[in-house]
Amino acid sequence: MISESVLDAALKELFDLSPVPFSISTIDHDSRYIKVNPAYLRLVGRSWEELNGQSLGNDLPYPLDDPARMKRLHLLDTQGFYELAEVDMLHSSGRVIPGLISAQRRRIDGESFDIEIILDNSERKAYERAIMEAAFVDSMTGLQNRASFESYLRQALATLEPGCRITLAYIDLNRFKQVNDQHGHSIGDKLLRVIADRLRGWTSKGDFIARLGGDEFAIVSVIPAAFEFSALRFFDLGTQIAQHVTIDDKMVQVGAAIGIAEAQAGMTFDVLLDQADKLMYDAKSSGKIVDIRSSLNPVAASEFGALNYAARTG
């Protein structure tokens, strides 16, 4: 039989040598450190002298009364354990470390303690982010892709408050095929990235930009009830897209056919897309380097006319 002293020594050695971070803390609200192993010190980037008797909250990037933490403490109070709960830990450098924490409440010699095991979940979270980006981000431009666009617009329409509106701008690049045919796909791809950067620079906070595929883009804007739509924004967008750019010693230029449709509460996803698509093709058929068509008010239409003139003569 193994004696208690030998078993205690083996368990202590296991605690110290384990690559898995362990901590033992008090059961009160502050969860003060009683003991941690070297793996835990490496996880948070601190020494035992820094942690001894201090609150575990010093290594959390949120308050001690955070709802998720209070839920975990409630589980310890009521059932004595919880397993693999998501938790963020704070490294001494300020870096947030995503983790998975399991804990048990133990009573030894009349005193209760919480024993926590924390697994570094950084690699899994990074993998999940990579999968999410592959699913919703266009690899060519870094913009959101069609799947992300459809998800965002459906949600925006479903939650649109009375009096607010959504504008959807469909953008198709004019003369892009000629650039590809004349200079090759490498320059065409670089040009798409330039256009994506111009769209990012043009948009306001809250605008949603996506590349739908090929040379088609979309911009979704949610307009509060107190704000008026201004077509001058799209005047500026058209002129920015049509600016010449030099890529690999080749000066190239594209224009834009832009169709803008507006939705109020109750309009469906398919109807809004159909309206914007038809307006964009109307603009495309004009043959102008930049043309904008809209279902909006006459003042906007006159502003678009000024843009068309500027595009023809610029």
Image (cartoon, helix red, strand yellow):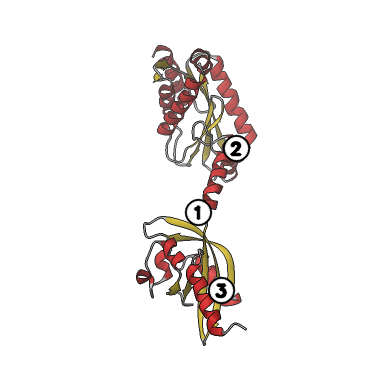
Q: Earlier in the sequence, mark 1 or mark 2?
A: 1
At a point 37% along the width and 67% down the height, the residue shown is 47
- Disc 3: CA contacts within 10 A as few (<14), some (14-19) or many (>=20): some
Secondary structure of the residue carrying numbered label 2: helix
Q: Using the image, determine if residue 159 lies above or below residue 278.
A: below
Image position of 298 with respect to 83: above or below:
above
Res. 158 mark: none
User: In the image, residue 195 lies at what x, y percent?
Assistant: 45, 26
| Residue at position x 44%, y 23% in the image | 241
Q: Is residue 96 above or below residue 198?
A: below
The amino acid type of the residue labelled 3 equals Gln
Mark 3 vs 1, N-terminal side: 3
Would you identify the image quadrant in which residue 262 lies?
A: top right
Residue 292: in sight, yes or no? no
Which quarter shows the C terminus? top left
Q: Position of residue 265 (x, y in %)?
A: 58, 41
Disc 1 is placed on an element classified as helix
| Position of residue 247 measured from the top left corner of the image (x, y, whole percent) | 41, 20
Disc 3 to disc 1: CB gap under 8 Å: no
Viewer-closest of 61 and 18? 18
Spatial CA distance of label 1 from label 2 is 26 Å
Disc 3 is placed on an element classified as strand
List the residue tagged with mark 1. Answer: 122
Q: Earlier in the sequence, mark 3 or mark 2?
A: 3
Three-letter amino acid code at the position of disc 1: Ser
Q: CA distance from mark 3 to mark 2?
A: 43 Å
- Please name the amino acid that badge 2 sits on: Ala
Q: Is residue 109 visible?
A: yes
Which residue matches tag 2? Answer: 147
